[in-house]
């Protein structure tokens, strides 16, 4: 008996020790039935701080107590699983990859617009399916069904669409193509029309200051366009489009798999508008005449065994626009007073490359290299005002990703370099400058895999004209309860104001153009500096048994310095540094609701308070409505098993409140405008018939209610007189516009 007791006493500590921890292996599925160890996965006990991370072989060991019941296993890009543990055992668990972990799914089918519950930043992802709901011929027309972006014409002659976010124009938005800055500098005014809609796979809209990884220029937010991938895009895609305003377009994608690692795609876009329209009888073209050829050759390299993926893009653009009076002839009337006319001829060459490396043995370690070169040449004139610009740009960025301890603690760090050379002719003067900046950044992200996500970034840049400065950014997401996300952000942005390239509508007036400051490093002006603060709340819920979500967000942008564009004297437009306050407040409430099966409704209300201290006092920014209401409804006929034919219907309504006109009080009475514009409401609709996975046709209308701004051009009867101005545009100019098209594709 004594001998047995000694044996029990010797074994008991061993048994106790074996119960103090649980071991196991976490794997991931690959092609076929193969599984591979998943290194860097998080394993932790629910509602405790006790956790572990899998090693290079996917193995883990974690302390155990009888009070621990729920074991959580998670990894970014995989579904999080929770295991119920009743006693110590060896665990072998397979994690399932997911592509929609951080998306709201309003109904069972795939959603065309999604919002993230999990990311620290306030991001909306717009898929190519959403872009097909409207006549999305280029990126500037891709936001008609999105309530976060405002779209309007910048003037009444060039047909240029201008976007706004948080009450600020696109120059305060970092617009990137696959996270490489692309719409900036010389391309700021017209660059959105240089990216065909069919080339776009998805768009990510980020409100508030963006990531420090992408640079220091973002103030209001970021819009990133992801392009179609040659390896996943259709082998052949053809889109034909025609509209009653004389616009004809052709888009063709031809993709080829060269071998098991290389794929290439040829993307061709062409559009033509050669018919003259003057529906409002003011003697000017309602829409400009246009020719554009746009070609991109895209290469993709993928080698999963070595952890490599790469994209190389080569692109050429030639864009020609003619606007002005109906009888204007460029051959005889250019830069004369025979007739008022304008031509904008742009030639652009781009080359970009991206290389990504993920360590196959340590998958949380990755290295990314980005490089881009562009040469933008624009020759243009507006009446008697000539404006030419040549902009050569180089962009490079190196990004290293890793984790600290486990994948709940992630870091990004790297170096960036940007070079821009501008050569401009404006105001009968040559302006030339070079800008060089080099920067280093560090970003830390914490995710407790339950309620809290935090991203803190800091970058340091040295710039030959802007000096040395620091850019801080912070984003946080907290989940107070199920299906919710409470976010807050703060960030600083700094940028050079390219006053002529960004505001080319100033040349389509008879105003004199003045630069009132001379002490700054760019056109005599100081750089623009602003802080952006934001808070957002997203809540998903069920209403009458159907899924819905509501979003409430408020953002404020405070300018510490701004290059003020002062239109308050109708005979002048002046640029000067801000003296006083300038801010933009934006409040938005959005509701998404799946009313019935296959019927979705999206509604939003937006309030803007955007004011600036001008020389004449503090005023609301011109042509920004304080109130906007948006509604979009879509319906798809259900598919029976084995069927592919279906109908799709989409309707969008926009209502805008009054918009303040810049003062015209000193004009002769015939050329004066009221203080505010009338309210306007526009209705767009599209019907699509899908005959098969290969073929579909669509028919649509914009501004179906035929709302049209009367007399959009001030002084149209005397275009070379002192009161001519094309910039007082608050609504549609053309009236109703109908279009039709077809899409054909081979997978």
Image (spheres, rainbow, N blue to C red):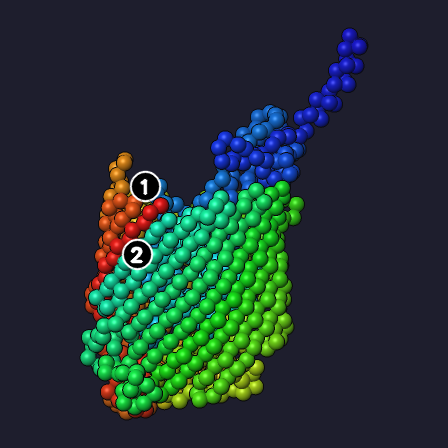
Of callouts 2 and 1, the N-terminal one: 2
Q: Residue 239 carries which label?
A: 2
Towards the viewer: 528 or 367 = 367
Q: Would you name the residue on which mark 1 appears?
A: 545
Q: Where is residue 641 in the image (x, y as percent from the top left)?
A: 27, 35
Circle 2 Cα neighbour tier, 10 Å, few/some/many (<14 / 14–19 / ≥20): some
Please name the residue shown 40% across and 74% down the image.
346
For label 1, the SS is loop
Q: Quadrant of the N terminus?
A: top right
Towards the viewer: 332 or 61 = 332
Q: Where is residue 27 in the image (x, y as percent from the top left)?
A: 56, 34
**Residue at the front extreme, as displayed:** 258
Q: Where is residue 672 in the image (x, y as percent from the top left)?
A: 28, 86
Q: In which quarter of the image is the C terminus?
A: top left
For label 2, the SS is strand
Please name the residue shown 62% across and 48% down the image.
365
When the figure is inspected, residue 234 is found, relative to residue 24, above or below; the finding is below
Q: Is there any visible trace of residue 271 in the rendered image?
A: yes
Q: Are marks 2 and 1 in contact (CB under 8 Å)?
A: no
Q: Determine which quarter of the picture holds residue 588.
A: bottom left
Q: Is there any visible trace of residue 408 in the rendered image?
A: no
Q: Where is residue 576 in the image (x, y as percent from the top left)?
A: 49, 84
Q: In this view, does 366 lie to the left or right of 587?
A: right
When the figure is inspected, residue 11 is found, relative to residue 44, above or below; the finding is above
Please name the residue shown 62% across and 30% down the image.
24
Q: Residue 391 carries which label?
A: none
Circle 1 Cα neighbour tier, 10 Å, few/some/many (<14 / 14–19 / ≥20): few
Q: In this view, does 724 lie to the left or right of 79?
A: left
Towards the viewer: 528 or 585 = 528
């Amino acid at each position: 008996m004594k001998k047995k007791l000694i044996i029990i006493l010797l074994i008991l500590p061993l048994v106790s020790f074996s119960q103090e921890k649980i071991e196991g292996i976490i794997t991931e599925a690959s092609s076929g039935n193969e599984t591979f160890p998943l290194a860097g996965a998080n394993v932790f006990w629910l509602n405790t701080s006790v956790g572990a991370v899998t090693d290079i072989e996917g193995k883990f060991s974690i302390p155990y107590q009888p009070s621990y019941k729920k074991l959580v296993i998670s990894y970014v890009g995989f579904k999080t699983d929770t295991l119920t543990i009743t006693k110590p055992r060896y665990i072998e668990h397979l994690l399932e990859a997911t592509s929609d972990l951080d998306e709201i799914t309003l109904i069972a089918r795939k959603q065309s617009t999604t919002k993230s519950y999990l990311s620290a930043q306030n991001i909306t992802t717009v898929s190519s399916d959403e872009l097909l709901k409207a006549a999305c011929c280029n990126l500037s027309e891709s936001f008609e069904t999105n309530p976060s972006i405002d779209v309007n014409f910048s003037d009444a002659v060039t047909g240029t669409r201008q976007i706004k976010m948080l009450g600020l124009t696109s120059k305060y938005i970092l617009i990137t193509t696959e996270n490489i800055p692309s719409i900036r500098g010389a391309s700021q005014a017209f660059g959105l029309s240089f990216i065909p809609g069919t080339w776009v796979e998805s768009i990510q809209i980020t409100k508030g200051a963006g990531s420090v990884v992408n640079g220091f220029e973002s103030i209001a937010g970021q819009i990133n366009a992801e392009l179609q991938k040659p390896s996943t895009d259709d082998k052949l895609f053809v889109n034909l489009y025609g509209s009653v305003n004389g616009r004809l377009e052709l888009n063709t994608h031809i993709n080829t798999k060269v071998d098991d690692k290389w794929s290439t795609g040829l993307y061709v876009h062409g559009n033509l508008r050669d018919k003259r329209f003057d529906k409002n009888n003011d003697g000017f073209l309602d829409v400009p005449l246009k020719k554009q050829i746009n070609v991109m050759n895209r290469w993709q390299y993928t080698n999963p065994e070595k952890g490599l993926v790469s994209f190389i893009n080569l692109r050429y653009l030639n864009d020609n626009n003619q606007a002005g009076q109906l009888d204007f002839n460029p051959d005889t009337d250019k830069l004369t007073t025979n007739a008022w006319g304008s031509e904008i001829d742009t030639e652009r060459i781009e080359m970009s490359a991206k290389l990504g490396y993920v360590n196959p043995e340590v998958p949380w370690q990755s290295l990314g290299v980005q490089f881009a070169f562009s040469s933008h040449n624009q020759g243009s004139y507006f009446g008697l005002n000539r404006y030419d610009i040549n902009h050569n740009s180089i962009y490079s960025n190196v990004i290293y990703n890793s984790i600290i301890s486990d994948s709940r603690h992630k870091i990004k760090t790297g170096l960036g370099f940007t070079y821009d050379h501008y050569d401009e002719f404006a105001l009968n003067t040559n302006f030339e400058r070079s800008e060089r900046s080099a920067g280093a950044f560090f970003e830390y992200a914490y995710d407790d895999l339950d309620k809290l996500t935090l991203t803190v970034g800091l970058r340091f840049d040295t710039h030959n004209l802007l000096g040395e400065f620091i850019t801080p950014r912070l984003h946080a997401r907290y989940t107070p309860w199920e299906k919710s996300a409470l976010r807050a952000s703060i960030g600083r942005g700094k940028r050079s104001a390219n006053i002529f390239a960004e505001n080319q509508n100033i040349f389509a007036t008879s105003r004199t153009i003045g630069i009132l400051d001379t002490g700054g490093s760019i056109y005599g002006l100081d750089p623009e500096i602003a802080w952006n603060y934001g808070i957002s709340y997203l809540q998903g819920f069920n209403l009458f048994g159907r899924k819905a979500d509501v979003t409430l967000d408020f953002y404020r942008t405070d300018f510490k310095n701004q290059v003020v564009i002062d239109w308050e004297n109708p005979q002048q437009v002046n640029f000067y540094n801000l003296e006083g306050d300038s801010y933009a407040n934006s409040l938005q409430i959005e509701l998404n609701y799946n009313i019935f099966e296959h019927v979705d409704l999206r509604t939003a209300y937006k309030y803007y308070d955007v004011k600036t201290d001008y020389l004449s006092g503090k005023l609301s920014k011109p042509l920004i409505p304080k109130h906007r209401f948006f509604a979009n409804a879509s319906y798809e006929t259900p598919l029976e098993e084995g069927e592919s034919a279906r109908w799709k219907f989409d309707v969008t309504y926009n209502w805008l409140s009054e918009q303040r006109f810049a003062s015209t009080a000193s004009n002769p009475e015939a050329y004066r405008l009221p203080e505010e514009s009338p309210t306007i409401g526009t209705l767009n609709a599209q019907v699509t018939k899908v005959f098969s996975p290969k073929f579909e046709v669509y028919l649509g209308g914009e501004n179906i209610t035929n709302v049209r701004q009367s007399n959009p051009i001030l002084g149209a009867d005397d275009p070379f007189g002192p009161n001519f101005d094309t910039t007082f545009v608050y609504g549609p100019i053309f009236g109703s516009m109908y279009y039709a098209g077809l899409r054909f594709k081979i997978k």
